[in-house]
Image (tube, grey):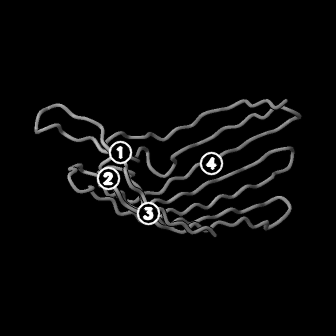
Amino acid sequence: MATFYNKYDDLYSVESVGGTPTYQIENGTRGWARGVELSDTYQLATWWRLRGGYVYFHKELSDKPGHHFDSSSLGNDPTHQILLQSIVDLPAHMQFDGVLRYSSQLPAPPLPGQSSLDLRVAWQIRHLELSVVGQNLVDDRHSEFGPEQIPRGVYAKVTTRF
C-alpha cells in the first residue's frame, strides 16, 4: 500500500496576452493531489500467479491570482483504476497471460468509465520467445484521452534475450 499527497504551485498554463490571439506559457496554476494505491501478488500454484491493484486518485487545480487558464484539461485522470493480471505457466514452455483493467470516467473531456482486456499466448525455447497478443478485446475501439479511437488489435511478436 502507498499513500500520497502532493501540493503544486507554479504549474503550467497557457494564457492569452491582453485578449489578443497571442498566447504565452505561464506558471499560473496551483493545486494538490492525493490518493492511495494497493497492490498484491498471489501465487495460487507453482504454475499460476495472480496480480491485482487498485488506485484512488483525486486532484484539485485552480488559477493563481491574476491568471486565467482552464486547468480542467491538465492531467485528465480517472478517480478509480483497477487491474487484475493472471500469469499461467503451461507445459511445453508455454505461457498464457491475461490483463483486465478498469478506469472510471474522465472529467475533461468527459469520457465514460471503461474496461480493457489483453491476452497473450507465448512459447519460449532457450533465448527465443514467440507470442501472439490480443489488445483491447472488450470493445472494437474506445477512447482513452479524447476523440481519438484506439482499435482492437492482434499482433505476433518475436523476442530474443542475450
The amino acid on which the numbered mark 2 sits, given as a three-letter code, is Thr
- Check residue 119 in the rendering and tell me which mark sits there, or answer none: 4
Relative to 91, residue 7 above or below:
below
Instruction: Spot the residue most to the right.
Output: 126
Q: Which residue is mark 2?
A: 29
The amino acid on which the numbered mark 4 sits, given as a three-letter code, is Leu
First in sequence: mark 1 vs mark 3: 1
Q: What residue lies at 60% left-to-right and 64% top-to-bottom?
A: 53
Q: Secondary structure at mark 4?
A: strand
Q: Which residue is mark 1?
A: 12
First in sequence: mark 4 vs mark 3: 3
Report x, y in % for residue 122: 74, 41
- In the rendered structure, the answer to whether residue 76 lies left or right of residue 24 reads right
Q: Which one is in front, 109 or 141? A: 109
- Check residue 33 in the rendering and tell me which mark sits there, or answer none: 3
The amino acid on which the numbered mark 1 sits, given as a three-letter code, is Tyr
